[in-house]
Amino acid sequence: MKTKDLITLWSAPDPPRLAPKQISIRLPILVSAKIAALCDMYPKKTKTEIIGDLLTTALEQLESTLPSRKGQFWENDPESGEPLYHDVGVCADFRRKTEKHLREIEKEAGVTEPMEYTTNLICSNDDL
């Protein structure tokens, strides 16, 4: 998700799937003011939704910049025919740890249909 997509997202109804445990954090004053301003601008969105969307966007952007290297051949892309490889870099480690925690949180929440999450594809950056 790109930062510019947040405006579209916040203008549309979308019930979030929340983790069972609440996290409490203290924000810098300016960040808190900016979030309050976004809440004023998008009154149909809760503070939780806005912060969650901002974090999602930042984490996706961060993940796309993590170092990544080609590992073993995995398969050819069904659409393009290009070879796909397992990732063996920092990005792959981040994805594996994310999936581990995702499964733990889903179990804790009693989720019966786990989210699809791909950990074995190469990350999209220029280190390949």
Image (cartoon, rainbow, N blue to C red):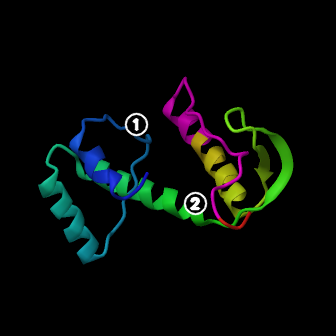
Residue labelled with disc 2: 64
Count of marks, rendered view = 2
Residue 102 in the image: state x and y as whole percent: 58, 43
Residue 40 screen position, x and y as percent: 12, 56
Residue on which the image places disc 1: 17
Query: Along the line of sight, which residue is nearer the eye, 127 or 34?
Result: 127
Between the residue at mark 1 and the residue at mark 2, the CA separation in whole angstroms equals 23 Å
Say left or right for 114 vs 16. right
Quadrant where the C terminus lies?
bottom right
Considering the numbered disc 2 on the image, is that residue within a helix, a strand or a loop?
A: helix
Q: Amino acid at mark 2?
A: Ser
126 shown above or below 93: below
Residue at 43% x, 53% y: name it.
56
Camera-side mark, 1 or 2: 2
Residue at left offset 61%, top offset 50%: 98
Residues at marks 1 and 2 touching, judged by CB atoms closer than 8 Å: no
Give the prevailing secondary structure in the magenta stretch. Answer: loop
**Residue type (three-letter) at the residue carrying disc 1:** Arg
Q: State the residue in front, 80 or 126.
A: 80
Q: Position of residue 72 (x, y in %)?
A: 87, 50
**Circle 2 residues within 10 Å: few <14, some 14–19, many ≥20:** some
- SS at mark 1? loop
Residue 6, horizontal then vertical, whole percent? 31, 52
Provide the residue span drawn in magenta. 103-125
